[in-house]
């Protein structure tokens, strides 16, 4: 099949590399406002370069991958749907939840599949965790812990446009908690601090946060995030039930150092970047998209899924700013 890529920044170029290695993909068509980025992809992957999204949609593509800036996501999703072309779009659907809801309304009933990029759903550890929950082998759940710690913060310009740590970083934890447990979040309480880069505080954001999520069956989920984790990129989950407990991410590249006597775990070089930690998951995610394009599977992460994670992020943002518990229903109703 022939896949179009809109946006060739860090993640777009990474997707181009991944797609070029998939058996199902015969050719790539790319576009980016920065001509040099498009040319670099063409030179590296043998992609065809076009000068606009309109030209890309008219280039006979079977599916499109939207990796452009967040502000462009709604228009590009809608353009793909109007052209009848399946869409893969990096999260978020839109910069704000109200825009995201409008996108959902606009595409409903069109019959064009849309997949939103939440790669943890394709990581083997998280897949196995979900299977363990679904099988009942853990018994009734009582506690979930989810962690995302970045080795260093993004640049100031990125932070200023990110929508805040809950919408940019924690949202991955929110999505994977919903997906692994099969439950919805009903209420949150969030706290945050600024002990690192001054520009994060100046942007009105926190660099380290914690959130308590109450799920609809009474399970408690604890989410921990930080922009400053010098040892590496730390993504983990613990799921505790009345019968058994399991963990995702307890492997030799875990960026954590034990000080227990005689303990050598973890023994490997710590993960230092999200692309390192999730290389296989990204490949599985885009492989899934080729199956969506081929019509052999439904979207594994819909706009509705992405919006549910976004409501949790908005609730946590409000909770942090107002120092109080916030229900999901409160933010959903606006």
Image (cartoon, rainbow, N blue to C red):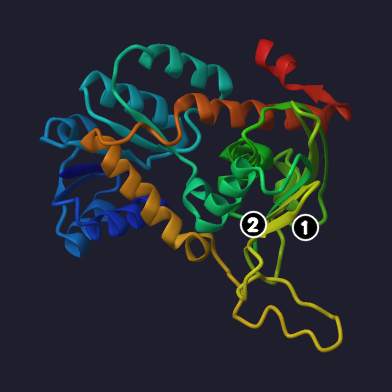
Q: Nearer the viewer, residue 172 or 66?
A: 172
- Which residue is pictured at 30% across the width and 14% down the height? 110
Does 15 sit left or right of 267 as displayed?
Answer: left
- Determine contact: label 2, label 1, CB under 8 Å: yes
Q: Is residue 266 above or below residue 272?
A: below
**Residue 74 percent across, percent down from the top left:** 40, 25
Does 57 sit left or right of 11 as displayed?
Answer: left
Q: Is residue 10 visible?
A: no
**Quarter the N terminus occupies:** top left
Mark 2 and mark 1 lie on one chain; the one further toward the N terminus is 2
Please tell me whether mark 1 sits on a helix, a strand or a loop.
loop
* Residue at numbered disc 2: 153
Q: Bin the neighbour count of mark 2 within 10 Å (Cα to Cα): few under 14, some 14-19, many 20 and up.
A: some
**Residue 205 percent across, percent down from the top left:** 73, 41
Please tell me whether mark 2 sits on a helix, a strand or a loop.
loop
**Residue 172 percent across, percent down from the top left:** 59, 44
**Residue 179 percent across, percent down from the top left:** 58, 38
What separation in Å lies between label 2 and label 1 (alpha carbons)? 9 Å
Number of the label disc, if any, that sits on residue 196: 1
- Which residue is pictured at 53% across the width and 60% down the height? 274
Q: Nearer the viewer, residue 201 or 65?
A: 65
Quarter of the rendering containing residue 112: top left
- Which residue is pictured at 86% across the width and 81% down the height? 260
**Quarter the C terminus occupies:** top right
Q: Is residue 270 visible?
A: yes
- Which residue is pictured at 24% across the width and 51% down the height? 38
Q: Nearer the viewer, residue 167 or 183?
A: 183
Numbered marks: total: 2
Q: Is residue 35 above or below residue 332?
A: below
Q: Is residue 42 above or below residue 136?
A: below
């Amino acid at each position: 099949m022939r896949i179009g890529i809109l946006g060739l920044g860090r993640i777009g170029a990474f997707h181009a590399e991944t797609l070029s290695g998939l058996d199902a993909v015969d050719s790539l068509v790319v576009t980016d406002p920065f001509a040099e980025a498009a040319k670099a992809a063409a030179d590296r992957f043998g992609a065809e370069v076009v000068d606009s999204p309109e030209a890309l949609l008219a280039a006979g593509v079977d599916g499109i991958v939207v990796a452009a800036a967040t502000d462009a996501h709604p228009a590009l999703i809608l353009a793909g749907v109007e052209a009848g072309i399946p869409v893969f779009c990096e999260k978020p659907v839109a910069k704000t939840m109200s825009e995201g809801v409008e996108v959902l309304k606009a595409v409903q009933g069109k019959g064009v599949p849309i997949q939103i990029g939440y790669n943890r759903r394709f990581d083997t550890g998280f897949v196995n965790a979900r299977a363990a929950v679904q099988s009942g082998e853990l018994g009734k759940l009582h506690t979930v812990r989810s962690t995302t710690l970045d080795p260093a913060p993004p640049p100031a310009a990125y932070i200023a446009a990110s929508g805040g740590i809950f919408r940019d970083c924690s949202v991955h934890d929110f999505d994977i908690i919903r997906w692994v447990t099969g439950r919805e979040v009903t209420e949150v309480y969030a706290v945050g601090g600024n002990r690192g880069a001054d520009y994060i505080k100046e942007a009105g954001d926190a660099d380290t946060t914690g959130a308590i999520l109450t799920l609809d069956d009474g399970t408690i989920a604890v989410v921990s995030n930080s922009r400053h984790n010098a040892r590496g990129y730390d993504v983990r989950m613990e799921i505790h039930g009345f019968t058994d407990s399991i963990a995702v991410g307890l492997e030799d590249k875990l960026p954590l150092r034990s000080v227990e006597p005689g303990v050598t775990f973890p023994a490997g070089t710590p993960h230092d970047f999200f692309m390192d930690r999730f290389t296989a998951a990204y490949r599985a995610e885009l492989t899934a998209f080729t199956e969506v394009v081929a019509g052999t599977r439904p979207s594994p992460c819909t706009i509705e899924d992405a919006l549910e994670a976004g409501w949790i992020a908005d609730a946590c943002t409000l909770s942090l700013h107002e120092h109080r518990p916030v229900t999901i229903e409160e933010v959903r109703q606006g």
